[in-house]
Image (cartoon, helix red, strand yellow):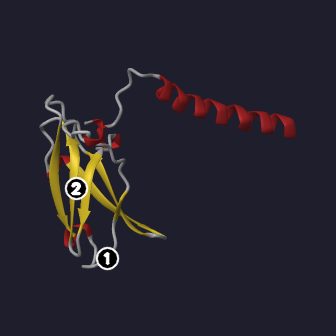
Amino acid sequence: MRFASFALVALSALALTGCGLTRLLDRSAAVPVAELDPVVHAAAISRDRAVIWVASNGCTDKDSLGAVVQRRHDGPQLVLSRLRPDDCGQPQSVEMTWTFEELGLKSGESLSVANPYRRPPEAVDVAAR
């Protein structure tokens, strides 16, 4: 009886995992837009605002990004997520500004950015000169 119960639980877990695994392996399945994080080209944090330059294809504006502050043991961290796709085809950096008040932070709090940083496409490599 114990073995039958264990087998039933194991098979159920495997079946449930299979559904999620199938979605991960199926490249034709649409990825939810909110999972597409924008790459950050640069960030400047002052006492009361965060200025972030994000990767854009020409259609990104502040309303197309979600900004959430996660409270972590090492201080608040800003996480940006793309809420709608930017398929305009003109790669560039776009400057976005959030006040600490908008982010629910107190003036002077520390803040880091969780998104990956990458050099913008228009950047010049001075070391290559």
Q: Callout 2, which amino acid?
A: Ile
- In x, y percent, where is residue 79? 34, 55
Marks 2 & 1, CB-CB < 8 Å contact: no
- In x, y percent, where is residue 103? 25, 67
- In x, y percent, where is residue 42? 25, 53
Left/right placement of residue 24 relative to residue 124 reads right
Residue at 33% from the left image edge and 68% from the top image edge: 111
Q: Does 21 sit above or below residue 55?
A: above
Secondary structure category for the residue under label 1? loop
Residue at 23% from the left image edge and 47% from the top image edge: 54
Q: Is residue 1 visible?
A: no
**Quadrant in which residue 58 is drawn:** top left
Quadrant occupied by the C terminus: top left
Give the numbered dot on residue 52: 2
Q: Residues within 10 Å of mark 1 (few under 14, many from 20)?
A: few
Quadrant occupied by the N terminus: top right
- In x, y percent, where is residue 28? 38, 20
Left/right placement of residue 9 relative to residue 21 reads right
Secondary structure category for the residue under label 2? strand
How far apart in space, not on screen, are marks 2 and 1 (Cα)? 17 Å
Q: Residue furthest bottom?
A: 107
Residue at 23% from the left image edge and 42% from the top image edge: 55
Residue at 72% from the left image edge and 38% from the top image edge: 9
Which residue lies under the disc numbered 1? 109
2 or 1: tag closer to the N-terminus: 2
Q: Callout 1, which amino acid?
A: Glu
Camera-nearest residue between 12 and 117? 117
Count of labels in the image: 2
